[in-house]
Image: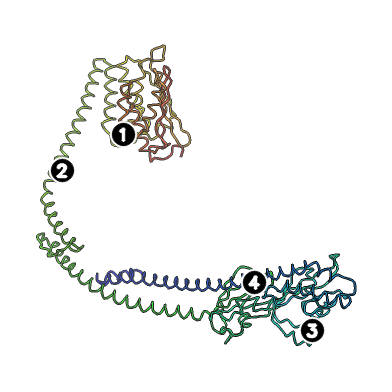
Amino acid sequence: MLVYIQQIIRSLSLQAKLILSFMFLIFIPVLLFSSYSFSHESSKSMDELIRNNEAILDIEKTNLENNIELMEWTAQLALSNREMNDFLQSQQDFNTEALLEIKTKLISDFQYYLFNNPRISKVRLFTSNPNVQEFWPVLLQESRIHNKYWYRDVLRQEGSSYWVMGEQEGVLVGAPSEPVRFEASLLKGFKFFDDTTHNGILEISMSMQNFFLKTFSKVQDPGSQLVIVTRDHKVFSLDSSVMFNNVSAEQFIESLVLNNEPSNEVVEFYTAGQPYLAIQSYIPSIDVHLVNIVSLADTMADIKERRSKLIIIIIFLMAFLSLLSYFMQSMILKRLRVLQDSMKKVRGGNFNVDLPITGTDEIGELGHHYRKLLSKINELIAEQANRQAAGKEAELKALKNQIDSHFLYNTLENLKMLAEMEQQYVISDALTSLGGMMRYTLQWTREHVKLEEELNHVHHYIDIMNIRYNGKIELNVVIDPALLDQESLKMSLQPIVENAVKHGMRQMNSKSGTFIISITAMAQNNTCFIEIMDNGCGIPEEKIRILSNLLRMEERDYQELREMVQNEGGSGIGLRNVDQRLIMSYGLDYGIRIESMAGSYTRVVMSMPLLNFEGRKDIDD
């Protein structure tokens, strides 16, 4: 299937391919971007709706906290009234005159003190002390509330606050002054002086309209409404809200699963086929769920309207861009067809084609460079013969150089044979070593060689230098045969040995007068260490420090310091070159290290990866 599609695409014209490319590169990103933008805007609208209604819920929660604090404070104030407590816990009978004084002073002051906040609708004390006379509506006998559904629950609280929400019937049966009310009541039990015997119940009430101020406010957003759910699953809200025209508050709550988390929880749900949003929060202090029901009908309608407008805009935009693309591509391809015809003529062998394409755009640039290409082709055809002649001449020069080097080797070989015939064996051996050195240095076909080849080259060098120094140089090589195949840089040992001979024989630390150079090698942790040590005059500590710095110094700094060091007896260029070659070949972890003691010895340690020259494999493998 994929191959078939590829064949169809290849068979299409360039204009068709450009249109398809335009659709994929423009239309699809536009669709994706539009979809993302629409989704982002929709999510943004929902987030804003949630934030606004969470703010409404938080305002109501703040109102509740203030009202709870007010009623708790009022309860504490009532229970801490010393005169009232003394009266409630008295065990004597009062005459009529004393009762009138209590009503005029104690009860009136108690009412005034507690009712200074108009939001509190009622403060009552229900006492179990039979010796206390009732003073309606503040002080009543506890027996009047024994039949209340909340009475036993209040007693079980043992002095803690107990909240009751909703319909509160009067305690005076048949009294016209106490109608049925919807109140939020705080109930607390209190005790005698012994702090163990129950003495009554305190009731502080506030109308539901004042307690849940935002819920029962007449000024409401028509798209949302707060709902209160008590511990016994009773539902309270503003009955006149337009939210409940078709669905009751109880039906909304039945569609939700309430949890006991104090933080706000947002839930989307459907009721009667319409989408809604519920933002709920649990108020643990009064054991009430506060739910903000939000209609999503207007929000969804607004989102659908924006989506429709966006689709229409995208369709018109695509149609306009398609037409514009078609006309622009036709203009471009017309000039490309002219260029195509010219190329066909060139393919037929006509390199003198006049190409009528000008301009500064890409097609004009292409035509200009195509004309330059034809001109260059003509020049290359003319130069090809000269280039072939030059190549022949280079081959002849290379052959001449090869003949010269072979001539030099043959000459040395003839001189060697002549010396042997004259029994000049020292000269013969020197010529053998010289010939070996020349072949090794002149035939530089690769950068890496075996360590064994490097050691042979060093042997030839020492043999020649012993002619100059009358055999006073001794070379000791102690290397495991397994390391002779170790990969080594060509011409890396000879500069170090040459440096030792040049500078170390000034004052040899040897009673016999023999200058000894020892070369050893060892493998450790996948690294090969080659040590070159001599018993020469050594190097002062300060000079060692300078040479060590020169090895890894930047080239510009090295050139500035080189002349000063050279005047003191050596620039270290040979050692630096070896170190730099090791770094370039193997990395910064490898190179050379110099150790010395003045008048005693000099040691140079060269490190490189443990590699077999054949195939660059580890020797231990």
Instruction: Say which residue label 4 marks.
Output: 64
The alpha-carbon separation of the residues under discs 3 and 1 comes to: 109 Å
Answer yes or no: do the residues labelled 4 and 3 have beta carbons within 8 Å?
A: no
Q: Callout 1, which amino acid?
A: Arg
Name the image quarter holding the N terminus.
bottom left
User: Can you give x and y, in whole percent of width and height, for residue 320 in the image?
Assistant: 29, 76
Query: What colour-coding does the image apply?
Result: rainbow
Answer yes or no: do the residues labelled 1 and 2 have beta carbons within 8 Å?
A: no
Sequence-first disc among 2 and 3: 3
Instruction: Say which residue label 2 marks.
Output: 391
Q: Tell me the SS state at disc 2.
A: helix
Which label lies toward us, 3 or 1?
3
Q: Callout 4, which amino acid?
A: Leu
- In front here: 314 or 516? 314
The alpha-carbon separation of the residues under discs 4 and 2 comes to: 101 Å
Instruction: Say which residue label 3 marks.
Output: 172
User: Can you give x and y, in whole percent of width and height, for residue 312 in the image?
Assistant: 36, 79
Q: Tell me the SS state at disc 4.
A: helix
Instruction: Say which residue label 1 marks.
Output: 556
Tell me the residue at 42%/37% (across/down): 589
Q: Callout 2, which amino acid?
A: Gly
